[in-house]
Image (cartoon, grey):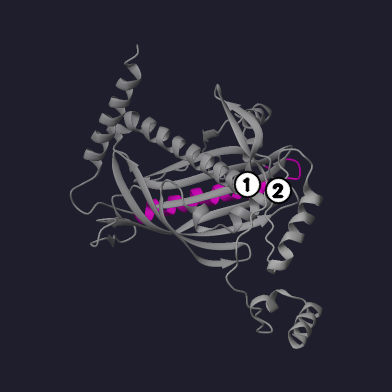
Amino acid sequence: MRSEPVFRQLMKAFLLAVFWALTVPASPGANLKPETLKAWQVYAEATEHRIAQELSSERKFLAQDFQAKIDPAADRQALYKGDLLAYKMESRNSQGEKIQVPEGMIHHWGGSVFIPGVDLAFVFSRVADPTAQEIRQEDVLQSKVLVRKPGYLRLFLKLQRSKIITVVYNTEHEIQYQRRSENRAWSNSKAVKIAELANPNSPEETEKPQGQDRGFLWRLNSYWRYEQTNGGVIVECESISLSRALPKALQVLIRPIIDSVAKESMQRTLESLRERILLGSRGRQEGMELSGRGISCYMDLLPKMQVNIILSDHNVEKAVETIIEAARTGKKGDGLIIIYPVEFAIRIRTGERGADALMVANDINIRRSERESG
């Protein structure tokens, strides 16, 4: 019995190896056909139509609140305990029929995570105006903000997907953000460029023509919702992507493995987001304990504020005494004062330099009088 998990992993690896061997030709690869792309557009439009209807609701907001097969109350309790939720989804056409995708396969997943101890304003400010460090994840090799406008970003991401084989892409994404209310917000991201790389991370690296590659990733959209609740913010992601179809003979064997990889990817994305938000909003101090999946985790990170004050040398000691007098409570969390030298200062408006740049007008007049009398 102990060897069963290892055996299953070996079987998965074997089946994936068979899959790639049978579906990745020695020639350049698969082409994205017009009928496949048209089916993707129908599927994406159906998904976005449903999302628009859900977002217009005054009572419900999260996608999980609208799913008939999901117990929203139980899911929220699981989230509050620290669990990561990931579940398979499907969009249908206006007649309720399954949308067929000739020579392609659509992967549709949803997931959610609870981020404790933060509010929506903070979370949304971080996701809507990210730094390069916040964009960086395990599968993001490079990132760059190409265009930044209010409520809009265009991002370059160099993505790496590794499972048996490694595939690297140059991608660009258009992202829109909007606050719905004080406690709710949404965003969506659409990949407007996905180019698989030949000879990645080498001097010979080149982009293959879009849609003329091995067909592992042709399209990618994600739709996000953010809702502030008691004690934190629930973040929900819904993702749809398009790849080449599986050979019919292997679909029964391979599809569960692909679904498992997709689920793990969704969970990894949400966990990474939670970690980045928490690390960006907290300082180290006694914190809170979270538990989920039978595992307890102690979060020793709590909200902090950093204040920078630049002073002339003769004012430092007085400032330190004033801060200590006002901030000291005798309890953990009073704060920390760090003093370090500032090499030089220039006031841009007036051109004043050195100590004069740090003084108000009256201080400067006093200093000048002291110089003249000296």
The image's mark for residue 225 is 1
Magenta stretch holds residue 43 = yes
Give the residue drawn at x 71%, y 43%: 228
Farthest bottom residue in view = 372
Does any portion of residue 98 appear in the rendered image?
A: no
- Label 2 to label 1, Cα distance in Å? 8 Å
Give the residue drawn at x 30%, y 61%: 209
The image's mark for residue 217 is none
Q: Amino acid at mark 1?
A: Arg
| Number of disc labels | 2
Q: 60 and 8: which one is in front?
A: 8
Give the residue drawn at x 77%, y 55%: 321
Is 105 placed left or right of 72 in the picture? Answer: left
Mark 2 closeness class: few <14, some 14–19, many ≥20 residues within 10 Å: many
Instruction: Tell me whether the residue at label 2 lies in contact with that at label 1, contact meaning CB atoms closer than 8 angstroms.
Output: yes
The image's mark for residue 184 is 2
Is 100 placed left or right of 126 in the picture? Answer: left
Where residue 53 appears, as percent x and y from the top left, is 66, 47
Does any portion of residue 280 appear in the rendered image?
A: yes
Label 1 element class: strand
Magenta stretch holds residue 119 = no
Chain part drawn in magenta: 33-61
Where residue 161 appears, as percent x and y from the top left, is 36, 46
Q: Amino acid at mark 2?
A: Arg
